[in-house]
Image (tube, rainbow, N blue to C red):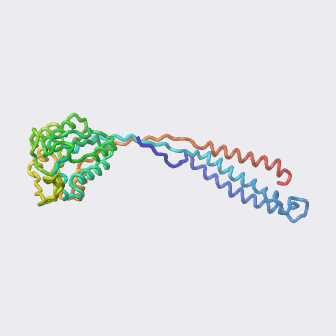
Amino acid sequence: MLSKWNEISFANPEFFWALLIIPIMLIWYIFREKKFYGTVKITTIKSFGNSPIAIFRHSLIVLRSIAIAALITALARPQTSLSWQDVTTEGIDIIIALDVSGSMLAEDFKPNRLEASKQVAMDFISERPYDRIGLVIYAGESFTQCPLTTDHDILLNLFGDIQNGMIEDGTAIGMGLATSVSRLKDSKAISKVAILLTDGSNNRGSIPPVTAAEIAKEFGIRVYTVGVGSNGSARMPMKNQFGRTVYQNVEVKIDEKTLKEIAEIADGQYFRATNKKSLEKIYQEIDKLEKSKIEVTEYKKKSEKFVPFALLAVFLLLIEFLLRNIIFKGIV
């Protein structure tokens, strides 16, 4: 629920026309003062000369003018509107299946494929505040890092903790997709989506990728597949026989044929990301293809705010009355 205090509005703004009384009253006051100092010389207020009390008596017209302005404002009925929105979504549930195998440490993306993929996915999540999103990670096996949730702060924290070595190495694409399907199959959302990201080919797991895609189709889950890796070779860290990290250029091998087949079976699309910028564009494209339909109902609650103005008017008129009949009695 979202709330916001709107600007003050007036229920009866036509009363502000009555403010024209104030300049008319001031003109009359000035005219009366000039007439008051006539040419006939008698004992009048002029005997006070420029004394403070003679000057201060003009405060009476100021007090009356402000009081009338406050009273007119009260009659115009100032109000504040406390409004809020009930936001509901027709529903898109999304599982991001992220490959965390050793090859994802290749540095053809900066700083490497895994970190670049994490950052772009986190940006994607931040742009979809109303969707339930979950996270599956896989390598030689797969597991759910975060179930479907709208608490994206928790999800983003879990994304930040992802690293290579969390699970046995390998690339079990079929298992990663099957775990995603198991998280989405019971969803009541109108649209169910899996985003499968990998930089290799299936070499582990008991479920073939195509079989997992067919299961996804049976449950109405659309699958977008993303192949991550530059063309040719990529610089990759490896351990030598002494346990030290060395770098080698390794050929990039992405099973694009299988990824395209998965996307075709599960009514999705296949994308190829050769650098971080192209990966960002892929997520932007998926974002356009999978837009939530938001229904917004707005409520407004009016709150009357005329009382302070009415009290101010009464207070100023009372002050004027007391000054006129005590301090300035007999000279105004």
Q: Residue at x 13, y 45 (%)?
A: 170
Residue 141 against residue 25 in the figure, above or below: above
Q: What quarter of the picture does the N terminus occupy?
A: top left
- Residue 196 is situated, as x and y percent measured from the top left of the image, at 18, 46
Number of numbered tags placed on the structure image:
0
Q: Residue at x 25, y 46 (%)?
A: 162
Q: Residue at x 68, y 46 (%)?
A: 313
Q: Is residue 9 visible?
A: yes
Q: Furthest residue to the front?
A: 242
Q: Furthest residue to the bottom?
A: 39
Q: Relative to the observer, which residue lies in front, 135 or 218?
A: 135
- Residue 240 is situated, as x and y percent measured from the top left of the image, at 14, 54
- Residue 299 is situated, as x and y percent measured from the top left of the image, at 44, 40
Q: Relative to the observer, which residue lies in front, 277 or 112?
A: 112
- Residue 130 is situated, as x and y percent measured from the top left of the image, at 32, 43
Residue 324 against residue 39 in the figure, above or below: above
Q: Relative to the observer, which residue lies in front, 327 or 186?
A: 186
Q: Relative to the observer, which residue lies in front, 120 or 293?
A: 120
Q: What quarter of the picture does the C terminus occupy?
A: bottom right
Q: Furthest residue to the top?
A: 186
Q: Is residue 281 visible?
A: no
Q: Residue at x 62, y 48 (%)?
A: 73
Quadrant of the rendered structure where residue 44 is? bottom right
Quadrant of the rendered structure where residue 176 is? top left
